Amino acid sequence: MSTSWPLWEVFVRGKRGLNHVHVGSLHAPDAEMALRNARDVYTRRNEGVSIWVVPATEITASSPDEKDPFFAPAGDKVYRHPTFYAIPEDVPHL
Amino acid sequence: MADDLELRFERTVRSESRIEPRDWMPDGYRKTLIRQIAQHAHSEIIGMQPEGNWISRAPSLRRKAILLAKVQDEAGHGLYLYSATETLGADREDLTVKLIEGRQKYSSIFNYPTLTFADVGVIGWLVDGAAICNQVPLCRTSYGPYARAMIRICKEESFHQRQGYELLMTMMSGTQQQRDMVQDSVNRWWWPALMMFGPPDAESTNTEQSMAWRIKRDTNDELRQKFVNMSMPQAEKLGVTFPDPELKWNEERGEYDFGQPDWDEFWQVVKGGGVCNEQRIAHRRKAHEDGAWVRDAAAAHAQKHARKEGAA
């Protein structure tokens, strides 16, 4: 028996103006079939106007194990947020 | 170190946050999820058969188009769920083989035959209605990919249930023969639908741990009660009765009292003794084996093109 088809991750743009969002995965022999299968599996009710398929093996992900140190640089930089700055209430448009 | 991971896992579950695929999780959690999600996926795939039985004999083009869309949805639901099991390290091919070799189960409801077209309506109304009761709480299950799949599925199940009820309303406004057909179908499906929630809590071996892990959110008996409460007013409106002499409103509890299904029958069907067990698996096996050449041809085509592109 043959080996099974490769796994593809599917991303759908719900409507113009929105990002593509990951919706799930599927098996297909090649990219073109992956797109067609994605249309049938993930957009049967007008859920999308555009689809990306990406071979699952091509995705590099941050590891949850290094979660704390990896995202730590953003943790202590409260000055990156607008609420860090105290501005008198009577200053308009700021 | 291991304690640390376990602590983080438990904290995540307790705080109603979600466990995601690459998080550390206890082996038992992973195994329970694969078993439960695979069983659910198999149910969707096998569930195409009882209704698929009526596609070629649907009484109108409208009903045929609806039934086709519904059966296609069941296939889609199976695929969402298989996709969720793969995030846990399960292998799709392996799950298919386990199903057709009878090593993994699917919902016993699909081992009952669809004798008349009214069964299409009753399956939508009661079987999908029971499935919705089971599935809505699973939208909050602790494993992220499973919860997300359930959200998609629940949205689509709503169409399934409404088309079933509408079909039955149409038949109930027809001839006496059609009304009798609906009542007969309800009589046959009521008890199996109640069995869909699983054995009584006292006998359910998986419930306690699954509740602690928040894989499962309500007990079998709680969901069964909820389903009865929901279904009674719908039956009255439709003009049919359920075949249970003990079924009556309990003022004190504010809920319906009802009788217990025949649990011996339930276990008999689970163990393979239902009317259609063999037929369902044989059909699935045939579809898998007959489709082998298509899978091989598509893979060969893809390989050829990959080689061409590599050479160019």
Image: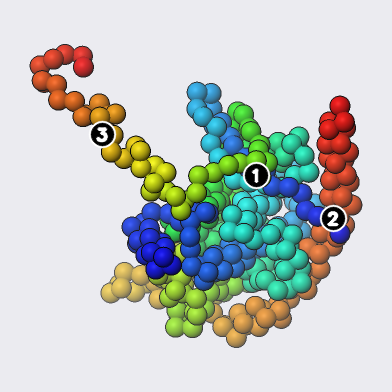
- Give the residue displayed 25% in from the left and 29% down from the top: A79
User: Circles 2 and 3: CB distance less than 8 Å?
Assistant: no
Q: Are marks 2 and 3 on the same chain?
A: yes
Q: Is residue B133 above or below residue B219?
A: above
Q: Are marks 1 and 3 on the same chain?
A: yes
Viewer-closest of B41 and B122: B41
Q: Chain of mark 1?
A: A
Q: Is residue B310 above or below residue B19?
A: above
Identify which amino acid the numbered label 2 is placed on. Ser
Q: Earlier in the sequence, mark 2 or mark 1?
A: 2
Q: Chain of mark 2?
A: A
The residue at which mark 1 appears reads as: A56
Q: Residues under labels 2 and 3: Cα distance?
A: 55 Å
> Which of the two discs, 2 and 3, sits closer to the camera?
3
Q: Earlier in the sequence, mark 2 or mark 3?
A: 2
Q: Residues under labels 1 and 3: Cα distance?
A: 35 Å
Q: Earlier in the sequence, mark 1 or mark 3?
A: 1
* Residue B90 percent across, percent down from the top left: 64, 61
Q: How is the image coloured?
A: rainbow
The residue at which mark 3 appears reads as: A78
The residue at which mark 2 appears reads as: A2
Which element carries disc 1, helix, strand or loop? helix
Identify which amino acid the numbered label 1 is placed on. Ala
